Image (cartoon, helix red, strand yellow):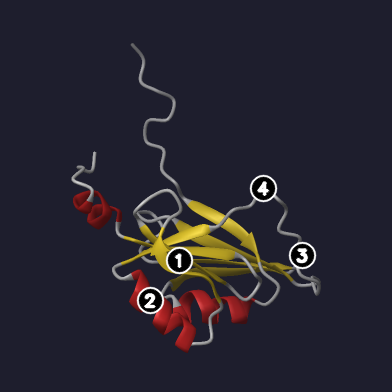
Amino acid sequence: MSKPISKGFRLAHTMMRVTDMEKSLDFYCGILGMEVLRRTDYPEGKFTNTFIGYGPEAEFPTLELTANWDQDMPYDKGNGWGHICIETPDVYAACEQLAAAGVNIIRPPGPMKNGTRVIAFCEDPDGYKVELNESILKHLAQEGLSHG
């Protein structure tokens, strides 16, 4: 039997277009604690790519923020886009701190609809939805399940 085509695959990054790179970096790095991993300007294409995350790009999934230099209108989010999700040890405390930093909490913390995992939602400067949820390990332990 041959090995599956997906052997060795991993989630590398999610790309989002942003209208103001510095505002986005203030939100994702300054408030949510990610780090800039690399930033490249492409003068010929008139855009900048900045990769950010919580750990080295080779080991952790990252966000690729793309700022097109001539974009001055908000991007259409479409009806297929959902959100990115960031785990946090305490969703309630995280929302208190985010609200104090001026972040718009659009769904207060509490159990998810039809479930028990604690979640919340906020918005980044471009209006992208960011889910905050409790650790999957904590949730599974509370539910009496194991992490496979």
Q: Amino acid at mark 1?
A: Ala
Q: Which residue is mark 1?
A: 120
The reply, left or right, for residue 89 in relation to residue 11 is left
Q: Nearer the viewer, mark 4 or mark 1?
A: 1
Task: Please state the horizontal and vertical placement of residue 50, each as a whole percent of the image.
Answer: 56, 68
**First of labels 3, 4 by sequence position:** 3
Q: Are marks 3 and 4 in contact (CB under 8 Å)?
A: no
Q: Which mark is residue 44?
A: 3
Question: Residue visible at 35% across and 55% down?
Answer: 117
Q: Are marks 2 and 1 in contact (CB under 8 Å)?
A: yes
Q: Nearer the viewer, mark 2 or mark 3?
A: 2
Q: Amino acid at mark 4?
A: Gly
Q: Are marks 3 and 1 in contact (CB under 8 Å)?
A: no
Q: CA distance from mark 4 to mark 1?
A: 20 Å
The reply, left or right, for residue 29 in relation to residue 148 is right
Occupied quadrant, residue 69: bottom right
**First of labels 4, 2 by sequence position:** 4
